[in-house]
Amino acid sequence: MTLLRVARIFDGERLHPEGGVVRTEGGKIIEIRPPDGGEAVDGTLLPGLIDCHVHLSNLQPATETAADDDSPRRSSEAVIEDSLRRHREAGVTTVRDLGGAPAPYGSGPPLTSPGGHCWFLGGEVRGVEEIRRAVRRRVTDGARVIKIMAGGGFFTPGTDVSATQFTDEEMRAAADEAHTHGLPITAHAHAPAAIRQAITAGLDGVEHATFVDDELADALAAAGLTVCPTLGTDPAIPVPPEIVARIARAGLTQATLQAGVARLRRAGVKIIAGSDAGLGPAKHHGILPRTLAEYVLSGLPPTEALTAATARAAEALGLAHRKGRIRPGHDADLLLVEGDPTTDITALRRIVPLGSADTGRSET
């Protein structure tokens, strides 16, 4: 049994400024008590963060492999384990992979048109029947979510970010097949045409929504879609010139990204946290704290940004029964930081190891 005495607790939705004592056992939260007079760390305890949009294998092309220790499959597994380690070091305890292996909480290769965005991941499909078969194959492989590339992408040469990649009928078929098997489906969509198609086809979520306007933000809210704006880059790491040029031609700026998030919030859209980690060097694994800081710069109060990475993210992943909140019965995925992230979101970068001797932790 472990007791954690802390000055403040953020439970996934609101701050408890009086703090308290959290008792854990066997990887579960057993009890939360008011302060008991014992020495408490002057920090904030919150649920482990959830990054809802990562690429653990760094978007390496799919490769057929042999079952031997020197195979590319072994290399991919090593890359994934290193990616997960980097997330854990940043306070992220759960991720949703939207471009690789189905686990953990992943999609497998995204559905894309022939030669479409991220075609090299092995998800090219054409026509209603191929799409339905591809969804069923992902279900068999253990996917927890279906991802479809509704439009082109900045990092795939030859694709058009402003255009759609599938017909309305194909998108509806993907959504229908996913829902038939009890899975949510989310769409990669930067531009209005792709966002609108995701809404009318009955999808559950949209990734990016970069160029969303007020009308589409209202439509997303009315339809109940969850949106994952993938802000957050490391300013110390340069972006390749060809990518910079492609992004500039599309009219993408930091101001555009932040304005889109502000529109989504004003409309009441359900926003969840996702970094697109693994997309490139400037979006390395473990960058989610910077994503949340940019959400705040976009107009989200820190508490809402934290909820987007805890309670609301857990709901989007179908894990609200065990993750994203500090409450009895939930997993003891806990993060302790110096200061108060509900007033200073950068406190997320000041992690206090739960195993250190000065954290108000005791074991019996």
Image: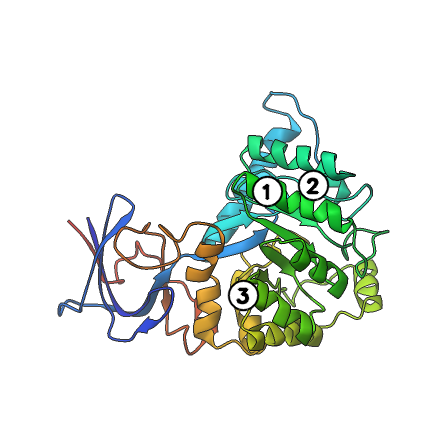
User: Where is residue 137 shown, x and y percent of the image?
Assistant: 62, 31
**Residue 109, placed above or below residue 167:** above
Observer-side mark, 2 or 3, equals: 3
**Mark identifier at residue 60:** 2
Judging depth in this view, the residue of 8 and 149 nearest the camera is 149
For the point 51% across and 51% down, the residue is 86
Q: Which residue is mark 1?
A: 178
Name the residue located 39 percent from the left edge and 53 percent from the top edge.
320
Which amino acid type is marked by label 2?
Answer: Gln
Q: Which amino acid type is marked by label 3?
A: Ile
Q: Nearer the viewer, mark 1 or mark 2?
A: 1
Q: Residue at x 58, y 72 (%)?
A: 294
Write the residue at 25% across / 55% down: 328
Q: Earlier in the sequence, mark 2 or mark 3?
A: 2
Nearer to us in this view, 73 or 268: 268
Q: Amino acid at mark 1?
A: Ala
Q: Which residue is mark 3?
A: 271
- Viewer-side label of 3, 1: 1
Of helix, strand and loop, which one carries label 2?
Answer: loop
Q: How many marks?
A: 3
Q: Residues within 10 Å of mark 1 (few under 14, many from 20)?
A: many
Circles 2 and 3, Cβ within 8 Å, touching? The answer is no
How far apart are labels 3 and 1 at the CA level? 22 Å
Foreground of the two, 176 or 246 = 176
In percent of width and height, residue 78 lies at 56, 37
Residue 73 image point, x, y percent: 62, 30
